[in-house]
Amino acid sequence: MDVYSDIIRSMPPYLFSVFQQKKEELMKKGVDVIDLGIGAPDLPPPAFVVEKLKEELDNPKNFTYSPYAGCREYREAVALFYKREYGVELDPDTEVLALIGSKEGIVHLLQAILHPGETVLVPDPGYPVYSTAVHLARGKIVRLPLDSENGYKPSFSSVPSGIYRDAKLMFLNYPSNPTAATVEIDTFAEAISIAKQYHIFIAHDSAYSFVTFQGFKAPSILQVDGAKEVAVEFGSLSKNYNMAGCRIGYIVGNRDMIKALSIIKSNMDTCQFIPVQKAAAAALTSDHEAVKKNNQIYEQRMNMMVKALRSLGINVHPPKATFFLWIPVLKGYSSEQFATKLLKEAGVIVTPGTAFGPSGEGYVRLSLSVSMERLQQVADRLKQVNWEE
């Protein structure tokens, strides 16, 4: 008897689970593997967030089911966060929905709004889950190529009008995973204009919105006038507050898209554990000093690795956001060859750029989510690799 559906049979394996398997195989052989492939924060959540979680665990009332949309305290915290940080007004009842991490929300949103065969514009290179979500919803992927010459910003004018006419939704992601690119509000304004012209919805993933450096502040797409008519924005506490394992995020913006998603979710889950939501509310309404301290640590790591890579002749520039470095591979290597050589000869895992789409060829993504000590070991190991072979 065939147990797998056609969707599962045609779905490629999730990249990061494959790398985890390779890591475990090497570790069994006694190799000291340094994993810079997955964007999993190594820093702890702010102490006050942990204390809030402990406090809420002592309240037996918090062990009941959460409201499907998320508890009131959390949704109001999200709305307050957007008002304070971006000047954006949100209705906690209709324009805010709690998610069990933004990854879950991205996948379920497409199941809520997409008809089979409808087109979705996906950034290339981009977070692989966008393509996975389209696949699971039986949609059609059209890649939106991004390149270094344009700062990895979409070249909206180069997309044929016929593609826009066919599209149901466009994904955007700034600060970007994997490229670490950032944009100003004018990029979002252009996207909103095109979406309104061609009747396209926009889903903006802002998972790294607060992991910023050099005084940069990432804008929200909802700051564009009229954005809520066509756009939603995903937010996550995984990277900004080091709460990855808590699986807590949100979607805000267009109430019709949020309503559609809420119908899917109310039939599939009963939201996140209430103490986690209340701890997340404390994070969102804080002064963000803990986030700033974390960013200082990431920036120190980034500067050290940039210096080490440049000493090898790899021209990499420090980004203004995320804890990733998007690294051009050395001449004569493909992305896969470069990553494989690092793994075999240095015991260092990085992610080939092609894992994020065809336009990622020629690059690898390196995560800064390990200590300075481990990054120094990476730098030392890189010097020992014979890149001339």
Image (cartoon, rainbow, N blue to C red):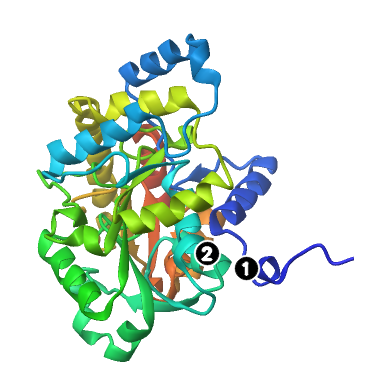
The residue carrying pointer 2 sits among few (fewer than 14), some (14 to 19) or many (20 or more) residues within 10 Å by Cα, namely: some
Q: Position of residue 49 (x, y in %)?
A: 35, 21
Q: Which residue is rendered at x = 55% and y = 59% of the image?
A: 15
Left or right of residue 264, residue 193 in this image:
left
Left or right of residue 17, residue 128 in this image:
left
Q: Which residue is rendered at x = 18% and y = 64% of the image?
A: 188
Seen in the picture, residue 248 relative to 332 is either above or below; the reply is: above
Q: Nearer the viewer, residue 35 or 251?
A: 251
Measure how far apart labels 1 and 2 are at the Cα level: 8 Å
Q: Give the amino acid at mark 1.
A: Met
Element class at badge 2: helix
N-term-proximal mark, 1 vs 2: 1
Seen in the picture, residue 43 relative to 37 is either above or below; the reply is: above
Question: Which image quarter holds the N terminus?
Answer: bottom right
Circle 2 is placed at which residue position? 132
Q: Which residue is rendered at x = 23% and y = 27% of the image?
A: 285
Left or right of residue 22, residue 317 in this image:
left
Seen in the picture, residue 95 relative to 64 is either above or below; the reply is: below
Q: Quadrant of residue 195?
A: bottom left
Q: So how many labels did they put on this image? A: 2
Circle 1 is placed at which residue position? 11
